[in-house]
Amino acid sequence: MVYELPEIAIKDRLINLDLPKGKTTFLWGPRKVGKTYWLKNQFISKYKNKKNIIYIDLLKTDTLQEYLVSPSLLRERFSDHSGVIIIDEIQKAPRLLDEVHWLIENSGISFILTGSSARKLKRDHANLLGGRAWRRTMVPLSIREISEVNLEKILASGLLPSHYLSETPIEELRGYVADYLKEEIIAEALVKNVPAFSNFLNVIAITNSELLDYTRVASDSGVSAKVVRTYFDILEDTYLGFRVKPWKKAKDRRLILTEKFYLFDVGVANYLANRTVRHGTPEFGKSFEHLILMELKAYQAYKNPELPIYFWRTASGNEIDFILGDAKVAIEIKARTSIRERDLKSFEVLKAELKTKHQVVVCLEKEPRKILDGPLKGVEILPWQMFIDKLWGGEF
C-alpha cells in the first residue's frame, strides 16, 4: 500500500535520478524508506513522457509468480519498448536480471531496478549487469525533507516516512521490527536461528555507535563470533546498518583501529534498545549523534557517494565523532545548549595530529560562534540545523 505524505510534513525527496537515454540504475534502500512512493509520485509525475514508463511491481503475488515461472516474458513483452521499465523489488526474481541484461544490450531500454536486499541476489549468483548499471541508494528522510522539525519526535519515531508521519509511531516501529526485521529476513533464509537473531538485534541497538566487539555481542546473543559477523553482513547487505571505519593515518599517536556499527534509523535503534529518549540524558546524546550521522549519510548518498566518513579516536580516549573526506572536516557532536572550551579537549589533541580545514561542533546552542584565540582557535560552534543547512549548501 502506498501511504500518503501530507505536503505540510514532507517536502520532495532530495534524491536525483536523471537517467540518460538507454542507461540503467539499481535503486537500493531498506524497506519502507520511500522508494516506491518516490518513483510513483515524484519520478514518474515529473517524467516528460509518462506513457513511456512501464511499472512492474513484484510485491504483487500474481505478477511475481508469472515472472518466476517465465522470466522470458519480460523480453517477449517489452523488446520493442523505447522508454523506461521500473521493476520494484528485483531481488524477488533474480533470474529477471538475465533478461534485463539482454534488453539493455539489444533494445537500448532504460531500467530502474529497486531492491532492499543485495544479499539475496549475490547468494543466488544473479547477474548484476557487470557495470552496465548505475548504483543509487535511498536512505531515511533528511532533515531538509521535513517542513516542521521536532527533535524529540524525530528521535522517538525515526525518519522512515510512514513512521515519522504516524500519530502512533511506536506501533509502526513494533510492526516493522516484527514483520520485516525478523520475519522477512528469516523467510528469505538469511538466518536460521530466530531467537539468536532477535537477541542480536537488541544487543546491537544497545551498543549502537560503540566500538565493535564481536566476542561480546556473540556472548550476549548466544551464538559464535563467526555467526555474529555473518549477522552484521546481513544487516549491511539489506541496508539496515553500516560500519564506520576509524581514521588510521597517525603521526605520533596510537589510534583505535576498531570499527563502529550503526543501525540505519535512529527510531528503529531506540525501539530495539527499549530506550526512551529524554533531553539531557546520555541516551539523548547518543541518539542526537546518530541523527547527525544519518544526515551525513543522506548527503553522501545523494550528493557525494565517494565521500568517506570516519571517526577518530586515540588509545588514550580522545575522540572526534566524524572525519569527512581526506581530513577536510572534523565534526564533534554535543547534545548541549552551552558548549564550554573544556568540553573540546579532543580538538586540541586533533590539531596537533591533523590539519583540517573545518573544525565544527554541532550542538543545541541557539546562535553560531567561532573561537577566536587560544589552542581551539578556529573551531566553529553551530546550531545543529544551521550545520545541516551549511552541509547541503556545500560550505564544507
Image (cartoon, rainbow, N blue to C red):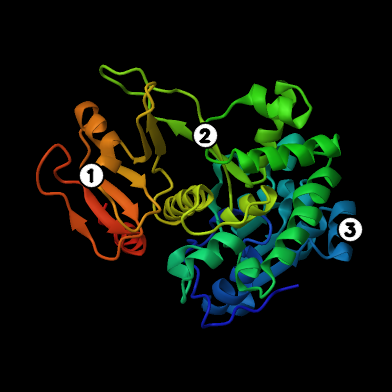
Q: Position of residue 294 (x, y in %)?
A: 49, 52
Three-letter amino acid code at the position of disc 3 = Gln
Disc marking residue 65:
3
| Mark 2 crowdedness (10 Å alpha carbons): few <14, some 14-19, many ≥20 | some
Residue drawn at x 39%, y 27% is: 317
Tell me which amino acid carries mark 1. Answer: Glu
Residue 107 appearing in the image: no
Residue found at x 53% / y 35%? 210
The residue indicated by pointer 2 is 260
Direction from residue 239 to residue 200 in the image, left or right: right
Q: Secondary structure at mark 1?
A: helix
At x 23% / y 61%, what residue is drawn?
A: 368
Tell me, yes or no, whether the two marked residues, 1 and 3, touch with CB atoms within 8 Å. no
Q: Are marks 3 and 2 in contact (CB under 8 Å)?
A: no
Which of the two labelled residues, at mark 1 and mark 3, occupies the earlier sequence position?
Answer: 3
- How many labels sit on residues? 3
Label 1 crowding class (10 Å Cα cut-off): few <14, some 14-19, many 20+?
few
Q: Amino acid at mark 2?
A: Lys
Report which residue position mark 1 lands on.
Answer: 341
Q: Nearer the viewer, residue 83 or 217?
A: 217
